[in-house]
Image (cartoon, helix red, strand yellow):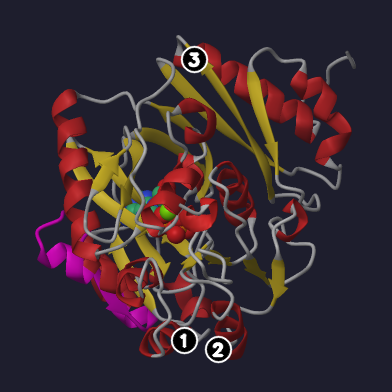
Amino acid sequence: MSEAAAIPLDARAPVGMVGGGQLARMTYQAGIALGLTLPVLAEHPDDSAALSGAATSIGSPGSLEALRAFARECQVLTFDHELVPPAHLAALEAEGVVLRPGARAMRFAQDKAHQREVLGALGIPVPFNRRVASVDELAMFGDELGWPCVVKAITGGYDGRGVWIFDDPRQASELFASGREFLAEAFVPIDREIAVLVARRPGGETVLYPAVETVQVDGMFRESVAPAPMANDLRVQVGELAQRIAEATDATGILAIEFFLAEGRVVLNEVATRPHNSGHYTIEGAVTSQFENHLRAVLDWPLGETWLYAPAVVTVNVVGVSETDPRANLRKALAVPGVHVHLYGKGPRPGRKLGHVTALGDDPGEARERAVRAARLITGEETGGLP
Ligand SMILES: Nc1ncnc2c1ncn2[C@@H]1O[C@H](COP(=O)(O)OP(=O)(O)O)[C@@H](O)[C@H]1O
Ligand SMILES: [Mg+2]
C-alpha cells in the first residue's frame, strides 16, 4: 500500500476558512496538529490569521469573485464570521462549492429575525419580538410590553454593536434614519448569561460541551466560567435545547448558542455557526478544543471528547485600554502562575479584543483572579514589577 494513500489525491486544501480574524488564527493553529494547512481568505495582510503563517489570499468576503477564486483552492469552505452576503453563499452552493456550514444554516447566524422566527416556531423559548421600522412602531411595541425595550440590528451586529436598550422611543430616531432593519424585543431581566457549544458533523452526529457562564460588558464578551454555576434541571434543559437548535439549523462545525437565565427560565439569545469567544476556554480547558472539533466536524471526521480538565476553567479577554502594545507587558503576565496567554497579533486600540487568558483551577474565584490579573497586566491596567 502506498504511504500517500491517507492523504486525498487532490491538490486543493481539505478545508479553507473565509475570514482572517483571531478565530481563523486559532483554527489554523488547531489544524497543524491534524496535518492540515488551513488557507484563509483575509481582507488585509495584517489580519490576525494572515500573520499566523496560514496561506493567505487577500480578498473581501463581500466579493463573489474573491470567494470563487478562494473556493477553487479548497475542497470545503468554512467561516470565521458570518458577514458574507447570503446571495453569495447561495451562488457558491449552486456552483457546487461545499460550504460547511451551508447557506441555510448560516442564515440563522446572519439574520436575528429569521433565527427567532424559525426557532420560536419550533417551540424554543425566545424573547418576545417584532420587526420595527419607525419610532412610532417602537413606541407601540414598548407601550404594549413596557420599557425599557431592546432594539437589535437584524443583520451585521456583533460584540454588542447592533444592540441598544431604550427607555424612550425617541432615543431611536437616528437609528431608524440609517436605513437598516431592526427588531424590537422584550428586555429580559437576566440573572445569568450562558453559552453552550455543540460540534456537529454533516450526518448529524453531535458532541456537546458543558454550559459556561459568560459575562458581557457593553454587549461585548469579556469572560467565561466553566462549568456555569446553575441548577441541574436548567443544565439539562439548556443541553436539550442546544441539541434541538443544532438539529434545526442543520449546521456543520461548531455552533455557539447563547442563552439567558431569567426568573428560573431558559431563553434563547442567539446562535453563531462558528467557533466563538465563549469557547476559547476549550483550548486548554477541555479534551478537544472548539477549533479542533470545528475542523473535525467540517471534515466529517470523528469528533473529540468535550469534558473539562479541571473543576474550574476561566477565560478573560484582553481588551485594549490604550495604544500600548500588549507584547510590551507580556512577561509580567507570564509570571502569574498557571495562566495561558493568547495574543492575536492585532494592533492595540481601546476597546479592541487583543487576546485572552485562560486559567484552570479547583476554584472558579481563584482561577478567575489569576486570569484577570494576567489580562490586566497585559493591558497596563495593573502594573507589576518585571520578573
Ligand atoms: N432582550 C434582551 N434583554 C436584555 N439584555 C439583552 C437582550 N438582548 C441582548 N442583551 C444583552 O446584549 C448582549 C449582546 O446581545 P446579542 O444579541 O448577543 O448581540 P451580539 O450579536 O452583538 O452578541 C447580550 O449578551 C446581553 O447582555
Ligand atoms: Mg451575542
- For marks 1 and 2, the one nearer the N-term is 2
* Percent of width and height locating residue 365: 49, 14
Report the mark closest to the observer, 3 or 2.
2
Asked if the stretch drawn in magenta spans residue 357, the answer is no
Region rendered in magenta:
117-137
Question: Are circles 3 and 2 on residues that touch, CB within 8 Å?
Answer: no
Q: Residue at x 77, y 31 (%)?
A: 378
Image height check: is 113 above or below 384?
below
Residue 302 x %, y %? 33, 45
The residue depicted at 39 percent of the width and 24 percent of the height is: 308
Q: Which residue is mark 2?
A: 64
- For label 3, count other residues whose C-alpha is less than 10 Å away and answer few (under 14), some (14-19) or many (20+): few
The amino acid type, in three-letter code, at marker 2 is Leu
Position of residue 386 in the picture relative to residue 295 (left or right): right
Query: Residue 365, labelled with which disc?
Result: 3
Query: Label 3 is placed on what type of residue?
Result: Gly
Looking at the image, which residue is at 56% across and 71% down?
12
Q: Are marks 1 and 2 in contact (CB under 8 Å)?
A: yes
Q: Which mark is residue 88?
A: 1
Kind of residue at badge 1: His
Residue lying at 30% horizontally and 80% vertically, measured from the top left? 137
